[in-house]
Amino acid sequence: MTATVTCPPLSEMNCPLLWEDLRGLDVLDVAEPGSVAGAALLIPIATLPDAEPAPEMPAAAFQTLILSLALQRDPTVEAPVLTRRDHVAWTTAGPVLPSPAQIAADPLGIYVLVGLVPGPDGSSADATPADYLYHADLLKAGGADEGDVIALLDKDLHSHLLQLGSRVALGQLPTKHWYVAPLDGVTIDEDIVGTLEVGEQATLLRAGRGQVVVRAESAPTRRVQIACADPSQE
């Protein structure tokens, strides 16, 4: 499949899509089918130091870049348009893993939630104290901005994205209560917050659009359905 790669402004050094010294590439998450007119996925690019650096050289750093790829059909051309957006880049002293690493979409934009945790051989100093929540407007002129930072979320909140039909919501599980608030552009609508008691040490697993599996140590596993309330109803 052929596509046109559109890179962010002033990022000629990042073109083409993947550079030659790429050491690691993975797919972190994919937007659910139908949530965006096309497709969107979240990937990390890692350029790792050499396995045996020269003794006289300083200790090499680990570089991790998180970017999204959105594939959309342009009615004016025959080939689809592939847009790359660079969201955040980290340089760490040891190997790290992106977590959380999620992408969701509404009709106008994509949302990216990403942070770092230590890798198998890394130290806790390489973890990010907060998770980054980004929004990128799919209809913005040029269509290739890296997006706006909506918030920095403390890792103790256990933040996650939820695809609710054509809407996107932010979920958090700081204690035994699960909180969910809708996202609207660069705004977290804290005036509309859903709450559910899930128990201590609970874990949440996304199980399809509007479906979440709740596991807790002291309660049966439940499948929960969640949706945005009808704004016409009080």
Image: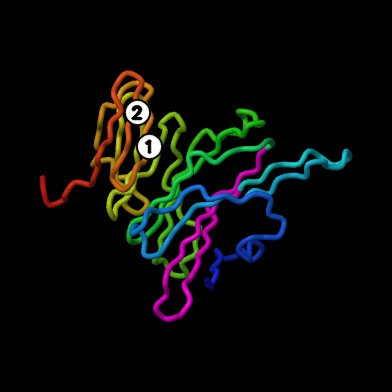
- In percent of the image, x 60 and y 63: which residue is there? 17
Residue ID for mark 2:
215
- Relative to 138, residue 213 above or below: above
**Which of the pair 29/122 is nearer the observer?**
29
Where residue 229 sits: x, y (%)? 19, 46
Calculate the distance from the C-alpha at mark 1 to the C-alpha at mark 2: 8 Å
What kind of residue is marked 2? Answer: Arg
Q: Earlier in the sequence, mark 1 or mark 2?
A: 1
Q: Residues within 10 Å of mark 1 (few under 14, many from 20)?
A: few
Q: Residues within 10 Å of mark 2 (few under 14, many from 20)?
A: some
User: How is the model colour-coded?
Assistant: rainbow
Element at label 2: strand
Where residue 164 sits: x, y (%)? 29, 49
Determine the image quadrant of residue 61: top right
Determine the image quadrant of residue 156: top left
Determine the image quadrant of residue 5: bottom right
What kind of residue is marked 1? Answer: Leu
**Magenta span of residues:** 65-92
Q: Is residue 139 magenta?
A: no
Q: Is residue 81 magenta?
A: yes
Where residue 202 sits: x, y (%)? 36, 26
Disc 1 to disc 2: CB gap under 8 Å = yes
Point out the image quarter for the C terminus: top left
**Which of the pair 176/182 is nearer the observer?**
176
Where residue 55 sits: x, y (%)? 88, 38
- Relative to 208, residue 202 above or below: above
Q: Residue furthest top?
A: 218
Residue ID for mark 1:
205
Q: Residue furthest right?
A: 56
